[in-house]
Image (cartoon, grey):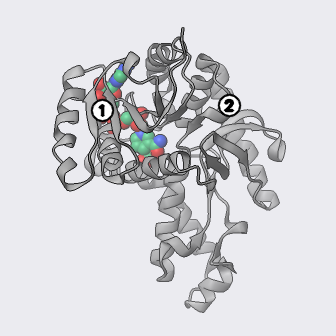
């Protein structure tokens, strides 16, 4: 099959539910793309979202947005996959695995058989396992199969810290790493506010109970999705902004450091597991992971998170 030349101004979104539609809306407003194709198993849903989002174009920038099929998306620079079941109140992300691996078994081969050369950005949950699944089913190189990973959790952490410290969350430098889920780790030992170690900055702002605050903030971040889902059944605005940010880093070849989910080989003793570590992200996807400094306890927690994901991946693939 003749390979299509990639169009850096084109994006595709597979799955037009809460997350897919909101991400598409964010991408329309971003000005990053001039063409966007939407795919959903429910074709009317994809068509309706394409129409509705298109009606915002006069307030943004010219763009072609339409519902399509797999033949329409092979020249897209990025394919964002948000198809699949979401959590019901009380369900964990890992509870979705069987259903969503099944859905990926119908989607990913469609992409692989057309020899797709762009970046596959996986968002559906459990995102680490599904990124691993997409990599295995597609045979695409590891750097071009990325999960949104803990980009959202890291945003939640920055937001919480910004509120706690009364500072712009963009000046907070801190990462959530590991699973996008219950075993995620707040990497406190490397956290800082514009280069000032976190605890020093906390004391400047009158906060001295570091352990209590860190425990509370990490729990808030970890439980955010459960809390939002209990109140309104789904989360979608935070992830839509995360998708936009990752797409921006890719199409603008920014080489930004983002905690996306990717295959780990050897870092901190983790081998052949897909999870989130800060990584340099640009036009080729993950350029390389960045080994931020972690204390012994954080490294132990990371290995535990990796073990949970490895066992789950072995069960489903
Ligand atoms: N990675 C992250 O940080 C986040 C991930 N999510 C995940 O995103 C996924 C989507 O969530 P929602 O949009 O809320 O769910 P939703 O139920 O609103 O939408 C899912 C969509 O996928 C479509 N779909 C199902 N099978 C398909 C197939 N084979 N091909 C194409 N489309 C198909 C459905 O028709 C539906 O429109 C879930 O797995 C959810 O857990 C949600 C929020 C954050
Ligand atoms: C649902 C989900 O993964 C989140 O909001 O973090």
* Ligand 1 lies under 8 Å from the Cβ of mark 1: yes
Badge number at residue 16: 1
Q: Residue at x 46, y 54 (%)?
A: 223
How dense is the environment of label 1, judged by Cα within 10 Å: few (below 14), some, or many (20 and up)?
Answer: many
Where, by quadrant of the figure, is residue 181 drawn? top right
61 to the left or right of 212: left
Q: CA distance from mark 2 to mark 1?
A: 26 Å
Instruction: Give how far across and how far down residue 278 sits, in percent.
Output: 66, 53
Q: Which one is nearer the viewer's eye here, 121 or 77?
A: 77
Instruction: Give how far across and how far down residue 81 sits, in percent.
Output: 44, 31
Q: Secondary structure at mark 2?
A: helix
Q: Note whether 254 is above or below 157 in the view shown.
A: above
Q: Residue at x 59, y 17 (%)?
A: 137
Q: Note whether 245 is above or below 125 in the view shown.
A: below
Badge number at residue 89: none
Q: Secondary structure at mark 1?
A: loop
Direction top: furthest residue: 1
Q: Which one is nearer the viewer's eye here, 192 or 71?
A: 71
Q: Note whether 299 is above or below 188 in the view shown.
A: above
Q: Residue at x 54, y 8 (%)?
A: 1
How dense is the environment of label 2, judged by Cα within 10 Å: few (below 14), some, or many (20 and up)?
Answer: some
- Ligand 2: which quarter? top left
Q: Residue at x 51, y 45 (%)?
A: 251
Instruction: Give how far across and how far down residue 93 sits, in percent.
Output: 48, 37
Q: Is residue 290 visible?
A: yes
* Mark closer to the chain start, 2 or 1: 1
Q: Is residue 235 visible?
A: no
Instruction: Give how far across and how far down residue 131 sits, in percent.
Output: 57, 31
Q: Which one is nearer the viewer's eye here, 5 or 180?
A: 5
The quadrant the C terminus occupies is top right
Q: Are marks 2 and 1 in contact (CB under 8 Å)?
A: no
Residue behind mark 2: 142
């Amino acid at each position: 099959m003749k390979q299509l030349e990639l169009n850096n101004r084109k994006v595709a979104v597979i799955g037009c539910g809460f997350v897919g539609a909101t991400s598409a809306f964010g991408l329309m407003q971003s000005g990053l793309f001039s063409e966007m194709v939407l795919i959903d198993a429910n074709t009317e849903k994809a068509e309706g979202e394409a129409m509705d989002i298109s009606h915002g174009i006069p307030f943004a920038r010219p763009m072609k947005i339409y519902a399509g099929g797999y033949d329409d998306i092979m020249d897209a620079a990025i394919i964002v996959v948000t198809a699949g079941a979401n959590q019901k109140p009380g369900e964990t992300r890992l509870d979705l695995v069987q259903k969503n691996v099944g859905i990926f078994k119908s989607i990913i081969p469609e992409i692989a058989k057309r020899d797709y050369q762009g970046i596959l950005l996986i968002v559906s949950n459990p995102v680490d396992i599904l990124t691993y699944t997409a990599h295995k089913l597609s045979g695409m190189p590891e750097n071009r199969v990325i999960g949104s990973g803990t980009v959202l959790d890291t945003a939640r952490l920055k937001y919480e810290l910004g509120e706690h410290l009364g500072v712009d969350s963009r000046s907070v430098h801190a990462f959530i790493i590991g699973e996008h889920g219950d075993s995620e780790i707040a990497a406190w030992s490397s956290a800082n506010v514009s280069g000032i170690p976190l605890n020093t900055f906390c004391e400047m702002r009158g906060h001295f109970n570091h352990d209590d605050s860190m425990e509370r903030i990490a729990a808030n971040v970890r439980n955010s999705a459960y809390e939002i889902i209990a109140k309104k059944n789904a989360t979608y605005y935070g992830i839509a902004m995360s998708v936009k940010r990752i797409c921006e880093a890719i199409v603008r070849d920014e080489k930004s450091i983002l905690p996306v989910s990717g295959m780990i080989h050897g870092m901190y003793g983790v081998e052949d597991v897909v999870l989130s570590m800060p990584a340099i992200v640009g036009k080729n996807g993950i350029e390389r992971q960045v080994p931020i400094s972690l204390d012994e306890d954080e490294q132990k927690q990371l290995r535990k998170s990796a073990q949970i994901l490895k066992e789950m991946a072995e069960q489903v693939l």
